Image: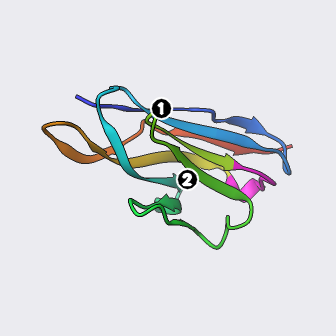
């Protein structure tokens, strides 16, 4: 059973930066695509950044120019670099990835990591 393990969340003041990581728990798999989502209390989960299988990156308007998604396929790890953070970026962040193994493939979710932007 493959898991996506997230890390990197925390408390940061406005204007600060964080880098989230999302790593596959198994080495003999490939991450084909990855998306980062967030969910704030009372809100629906929203897509903030996407790295497609064809290597196209896309961002929500609210984070474009501040967040950067990347994927290191050699390490089976994706990243979300978040700069110039704002209080409205506060949410639980989840990664979602299509993971391909030798005999399987499917969509998986990370466990979520809390990002709090506050002074």
Q: Could one spot residue 55 in this view of the protein?
A: yes
Q: Secondary structure at mark 2?
A: loop
* Left-right relation of 50 to 68: left
88 versus 98 height, above or below: below
Q: Which residue is found at the position 70% from the left and 50% from the top? A: 82
Gap in angstroms between the C-alphas marked 2 and 1: 32 Å
For disc 2, the marked residue is: 41
Q: Residues within 10 Å of mark 1 (few under 14, many from 20)?
A: few
Q: Which residue is found at the position 83% from the left and 45% from the top? A: 16
The quarter in which the N terminus is drawn is top left
Where residue 107 appears, as percent x and y from the top left, is 28, 49
Q: Is residue 87 magenta?
A: yes
Q: Which residue is found at the position 37% from the left and 26% from the top? A: 25
Mark 2 or mark 1: name the one nearer the start of the chain.
2
Which residue range is magenta in the image?
82-89
Where residue 84 appears, as percent x and y from the top left, is 81, 54
Q: Quadrant of residue 103?
A: top left
Q: Residues within 10 Å of mark 2 (few under 14, many from 20)?
A: few
Q: Which residue is found at the position 65% from the left and 42% from the top? A: 115
104 versus 62 height, above or below: above
Q: Most extreme residue toward the front, as rendered?
A: 74
Where residue 89 appears, as percent x and y from the top left, is 68, 55
- Numbered circle sitting on residue 44: none
For disc 1, the marked residue is: 75
Q: Could one spot residue 43 in this view of the protein?
A: no
């Amino acid at each position: 059973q493959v898991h996506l393990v997230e890390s990197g969340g925390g408390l940061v003041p406005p204007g600060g930066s964080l880098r989230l990581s999302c790593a596959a728990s198994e080495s003999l798999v490939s991450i084909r695509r990855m998306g980062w989502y967030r969910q704030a209390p009372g809100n629906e989960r929203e897509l903030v950044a996407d790295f497609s299988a064809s290597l196209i990156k896309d961002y929500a308007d609210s984070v474009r120019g501040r967040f950067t998604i990347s994927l290191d396929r050699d390490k089976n790890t994706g990243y979300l670099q978040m700069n110039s953070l704002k209080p409205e970026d506060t949410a639980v962040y989840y990664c979602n990835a299509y993971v391909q193994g030798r005999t399987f493939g499917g969509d998986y979710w990370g466990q979520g990591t809390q990002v709090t932007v506050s002074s």
